[in-house]
Image (cartoon, rainbow, N blue to C red):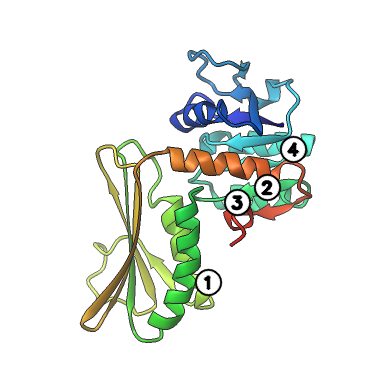
């Protein structure tokens, strides 16, 4: 049985994963971390991870970028594998994550769903065909009105997948209102929509002369991310130091 600490246990995703884990025969949440302790859980909850004294095999993180540094320090000290799902990290935090992966197992993914990770692979192949043919590439992401970061980490991951397939020759444009000029062929436009209760909607558009090809992924429930996080935690527990992603979990 894999013993997991749920970092951000009383947030929406933390509670979703807690509920899913109750029916999982291979993983148990043995402790939670959250500054809000007003929810009754079946495991002990600590306000900070430094105060946690419960033995575990892996940390699942769905928290906030403001507390990720403390989490990374804890995982380095404890040599604790971590599934890092929090988005909106700074460049400094991403670099700190890379350094941590030299000492313990780290799985960082902007999106934990199987569908999105399959889409990342498909986009590489599509871009290698369509980009040289002159297709413009745009990404539109939609999320609920409570999401803090924009664009989403998943939108950036999609853009990165496209860009890497073309030797990182593209640049990203987030706002065209500041300059009146034609679109650059080497740009990827990324637009963010925030409204209602949209769980997550990502669309990658290849617009060419007289034809448009669209790849779209829609998440109807946060459960798809929770299930992915649990599978990632079971995969990561006991793994040697290194940087992993969901493609390792699902063997893509």
CA gap, disc 3 to disc 4? 17 Å
CA gap, disc 1 to disc 2? 21 Å
**Mark 4 neighbour density, 10 Å: few (under 14) some (14–19) many (20 or more):** many
Q: How many marks?
A: 4
Q: Secondary structure at mark 2?
A: strand
Can you say whether 16 is above or below 39 in the image?
below
Mark 3 or mark 1, whichever is nearer to me: 1
Q: Position of residue 181 (x, y in %)?
A: 24, 75
Q: Position of residue 15 (x, y in %)?
A: 48, 26
Of callouts 1 and 2, the N-terminal one: 2
The answer to whether residue 78 shows anywhere in this view is yes
Looking at the picture, tell me which residue is in the foreground, 86 or 226: 226
Of callouts 4 and 1, the N-terminal one: 4
The numbered mark at residue 164 is 1
The numbered mark at residue 115 is none
Looking at the picture, tell me which residue is in the foreground, 217 or 198: 217
Which residue does the numbered mark 2 point to in the structure image? 106
Marks 3/1 in contact by CB < 8 Å: the verdict is no
Which residue does the numbered mark 3 point to in the structure image? 94
Q: Secondary structure at mark 4?
A: loop
């Amino acid at each position: 049985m894999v013993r997991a600490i749920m970092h951000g246990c009383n947030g929406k995703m933390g509670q979703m994963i807690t509920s899913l884990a109750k029916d999982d025969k291979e993983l148990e949440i043995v402790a939670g971390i959250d500054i809000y302790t007003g929810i009754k859980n079946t495991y002990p909850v600590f306000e900070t991870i430094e105060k946690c004294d419960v033995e575990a095999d892996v940390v699942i993180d769905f928290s906030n970028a403001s507390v990720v540094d403390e989490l990374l320090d804890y995982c380095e000290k404890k040599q604790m594998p971590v599934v890092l799902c929090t988005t909106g990290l700074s460049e400094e935090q991403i670099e700190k994550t890379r350094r941590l992966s030299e000492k313990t197992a780290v799985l960082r993914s902007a999106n934990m769903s199987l569908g999105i990770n399959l889409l990342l692979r498909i986009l590489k192949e599509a871009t290698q065909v369509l980009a040289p043919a002159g297709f413009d590439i745009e990404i539109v992401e939609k999320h609920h009105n409570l999401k803090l970061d924009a664009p989403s980490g998943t939108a950036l991951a999609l853009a990165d997948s496209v860009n890497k397939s073309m030797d990182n020759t593209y640049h990203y444009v987030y706002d065209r209102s500041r300059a009146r000029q034609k679109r650059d062929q080497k740009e990827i436009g990324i637009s963010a929509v925030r409204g209602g209760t949209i769980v997550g909607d990502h669309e990658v558009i290849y617009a060419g002369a007289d034809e448009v090809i669209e790849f779209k992924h829609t998440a109807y429930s946060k459960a798809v991310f929770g299930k992915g996080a649990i599978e990632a935690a079971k995969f990561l527990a006991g793994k040697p130091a290194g940087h992993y992603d969901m493609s390792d979990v699902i063997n893509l």
